[in-house]
Amino acid sequence: MSILGAIADDVTGATDLAAMLVTAGARTVQLLGVPAADSPPPEADAVVVSLKSRTAPVAQAVAESCASLDRLRAWGARSILFKVCSTFDSTDCGNIGPVADALREALGAGIVPVCPAFPANGRTVYQGYLFVGTALLNESGMENHPLTPMRDANLVRVLGRQTRARVGLVPFATVERGAEAVREALSALKREGIAYAIVDAVSDPQLATLGEAIAECRLMVGGSGLALGLPAAWRRRGWLFQRMDAARLPPVPGRAAILSGSCSRTTLAQVAHARARCASFALDPLAHPNADTLAAAAIDWSDRQPLDATLLIYASASPERVAEVQAVLGRERAAALIEQAFARIAEALVARGVRRLIVAGGETSGAVVSRLGLTRLVIGPTIDPGVPWTFAPERDLLLALKSGNFGTTDFFTKALTMLEARP
């Protein structure tokens, strides 16, 4: 039986969480999409189900999350983690609150701890406010996100607008006093009728404290940073043994390609860095406002590149350019166009021998793995915090799925160099 069953609202977030668990020595399997009702339980300490529910209609997000919960419970998971982005991506109506409400009701859970902090990537929560580096969330560039613009950094307010239940806070000073103080604070909030508690965390030791405090909770909501403390807490309870080979992947020779759909500041810098080192092609949705023709232009370009060239195909653009495209095509149509084009491009590149594929952006990653028909990823070594290499056995493909805001400026080239350096 698995100790943890996780439901992630996008593919890169699921991979991020799985990487953290593997690094901590927990055997982890990532499943892509809702597991089939007759699928056997994976042999793993943790099972992470990755959905594409962050920006889906609320009813769909709730239905897929609950169906995933049914499978995880049938497989014997002790605890459930609803994994959300470390920038708490959502809108005022969801989907974090509605999905959490449905999971909480199904599990009969009491108070639910909520913490998206990931200090290694600059995500911290203090007095309920989410920071990205030194900036408040709503001043970090996330206010310009094309699908889920975040214009309020106060997570108590953000979640409070999405749920029917009351939201409280376990502040920094309480977390500093240790796991027992956190447990007592959660119990006190529960007695007051609070259903969700935003928990502050600004450092890895505080996440370790939180892991010990909530290890036996039925339901928790947060980012991959929670995985920093949970495996150690499981070992203290005798549920988990350290595994030294959890991140080993098979060698896979073949051509390399990078597909970037994210428009985050971080990814824009990574694309600029890689353009000087790769054969690059920019998608132009205004010149080709059809997914088939947009993809065909990129595929035709790729066919004319040297076989030893690393391919970089990107739709990453400045906020001004994104606004221009959305003004002409509409927000939803523009997003769908880019996702569908990248899905077609990925399929064509793999058919042409690409075996090392990096994808930037949660929505883009979801579209790509769906088009490739992948259902399972084996989690490998970490490239940068929150981003591992993975192996897709169904396509004999090494795959790195990167959240838009993650990774150093040289992430793309570093990831490929890392493979070349392996024995």
Image (cartoon, rainbow, N blue to C red):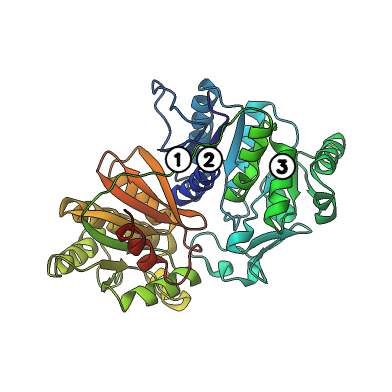
Crowding at dot 1, Cα within 10 Å, few <14 / some 14-19 / many 20+, comes out as many
**Which label's residue is closer to the chain start, 1 or 3?**
3
Callout 3, which amino acid?
Pro
- The residue lying at 44 percent from left, 24 percent from top is 41
Question: Which of the pair 88/305 is nearer the observer?
Answer: 305
- 105 with respect to 8 (left or right): right
Q: In which quarter of the image is residue 337?
A: bottom left
Nearer the observer, disc 3 or disc 2? 2
How far apart are labels 3 and 2 at the CA level? 24 Å
Task: Give coordinates of residue 407: x percent, y percent.
Answer: 48, 64
Q: Is mark 2 on a helix, strand or loop?
A: loop
The number of callouts visible is 3
Dot 3 or dot 2, earlier in sequence: 2
Q: What element carries label 3?
A: strand
Is the C-beta separation of discs 1 and 2 under 8 Å? yes
- Contact check, label 3 and label 2, Cβ < 8 Å: no
Horizontal and vertical percent position of residue 191: 87, 34
| Spatial separation of the CA atoms under disc 1 and disc 2 | 6 Å
**Label 3 sits on residue:** 113
Near mark 3 (Cα within 10 A), the count class, few <14, some 14-19 or many ≥20, is many
The residue beneath circle 2 is 25
Is disc 1 placed on a helix, strand or loop? loop
Residue type (three-letter) at the residue carrying disc 1? Ala
Nearer-the-camera pick, 125 or 212: 212
Q: Position of residue 70 (x, y in %)?
A: 52, 25
| Picture residue at 72% right of the left edge, 45% below the top | 210
Q: Mark 1 points at which residue?
A: 246
Q: Is residue 86 left or right of residue 237?
A: left
Residue 70 in the figure: left or right of residue 30: right
